[in-house]
Image (cartoon, rainbow, N blue to C red):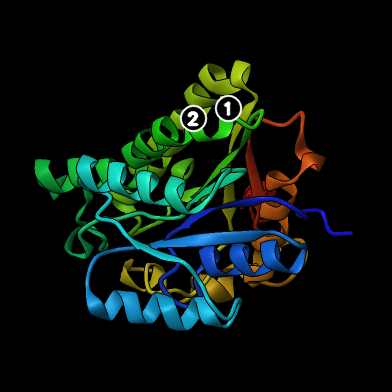
Amino acid sequence: MGLMDGKVGLVVGVANDRSYAWHIANEIYAHGGTCAFAHIPGEKNARRTQRAAEKITPDPILYECNAGSDEDIDTLFASYAKDHDRLDFLVHSIAYADRDWLQLGMFAKTPRQAYLDAIDISAYTLAAMAARAKPLMTKNGGGSIMAMSYYGSEKVVLGYNVMGVAKSCLEATTRYLAAELGPEGIRVNTISGGYLRTLASSAVGGTDDLEIRAAEKAPLRRTTEGSDVGKTAVYLASDLSSGVTGENIYVDCGVNIIGA
């Protein structure tokens, strides 16, 4: 009997088989759950997500969604509801910031629109998706929503810049959602994963040696693996975390506890 038997949900943000979202979906299936996948628009993105998802399940259900469009988000959840009779979990694993401003010494120069775009896609979309997920989850007694954060939300990670601000906003959004949706039986949490070399992390300047430094600094003396985050996501999506909400759970091999 698996921890996720009978549970089905939506994973937003699988770009390839190296992303945290992919590892989360992979562990969900390994523990008996199933999920649908949402990807950003475009044939290339669809093919990339399709290839990654097929490594987990032979016939993945994919939906296209521009998270910057309320209409697209409406369509995403309406389409999901047509294909599924329940929504037990929602995984929000999307973020965006113009890479031109994710460089050393560029934070103070970040233009207003680039700043707002980062918060919109990286944080506001969690609230937008949670609002659409609420009626689907409440009809079956509740559910679990989780989003991906990073330590740059709390401490300065050189080059992370406006993305750090957006992740801080994401974590605050999670707490407010947890308070508001809790009476409906919906839990909302973030996972603060350690540095993982992905398409997204490669856009951040100043991270060339971050992987090495993280391994040296971490109490476990290694960098975070995708499966570490995937297993924690299973815990949050399963009934094992029935009393956990509004939390930011670190899965970074202990890097966050080290002061210097």
Using a 10 Å C-alpha cutoff, classify the residue at mark 1 as few (fewer than 14 neighbours), some (14 to 19) or many (20 or more): some
The image shows residue 58 at horizontal and vertical percentages of: 57, 81
User: Which residue is drawn at the image coordinates 77% and 33% (left, top)?
Assistant: 242
- Residue highlighted by disc 2: 134
Secondary structure beneath label 2: helix
Q: Compared to 186, does 202 lie above or below? A: below
Question: Does residue 82 appear to the left or right of 137 in the view shown?
Answer: left
What's the residue type where badge 1 is placed? Thr
The residue nearer to you, when weighing 212 against 230, is 230
Q: Compared to 186, does 55 lie above or below? A: below
User: Which residue is drawn at the image coordinates 58% and 43% (left, top)?
Assistant: 86
Whole-number angstrom distance, CA of label 2 to CA of label 1? 6 Å
The residue nearer to you, when weighing 163 against 32, is 32
Q: Quadrant of residue 153?
A: top left
The image shows residue 139 at horizontal and vertical percentages of: 58, 29
The image shows residue 102 at horizontal and vertical percentages of: 26, 60
User: Which residue is drawn at the image coordinates 34% and 50% (left, top)?
Assistant: 76
Using a 10 Å C-alpha cutoff, classify the residue at mark 2 as few (fewer than 14 neighbours), some (14 to 19) or many (20 or more): some
- Residue highlighted by disc 1: 138
Can residue 156 be seen in this snapshot? no
Question: Does residue 52 appear to the left or right of 66 in the view shown?
Answer: right
The reply to whether the C-beta atoms of the residues labelled 2 and 1 are less than 8 Å apart is yes
User: Which residue is drawn at the image coordinates 60% and 64% (left, top)?
Assistant: 25
The image shows residue 179 at horizontal and vertical percentages of: 55, 18
Question: Does residue 243 appear to the left or right of 152 in the view shown?
Answer: right
Q: Quadrant of residue 239?
A: top right
The residue nearer to you, when weighing 232 against 110, is 232
Secondary structure beneath label 1: helix
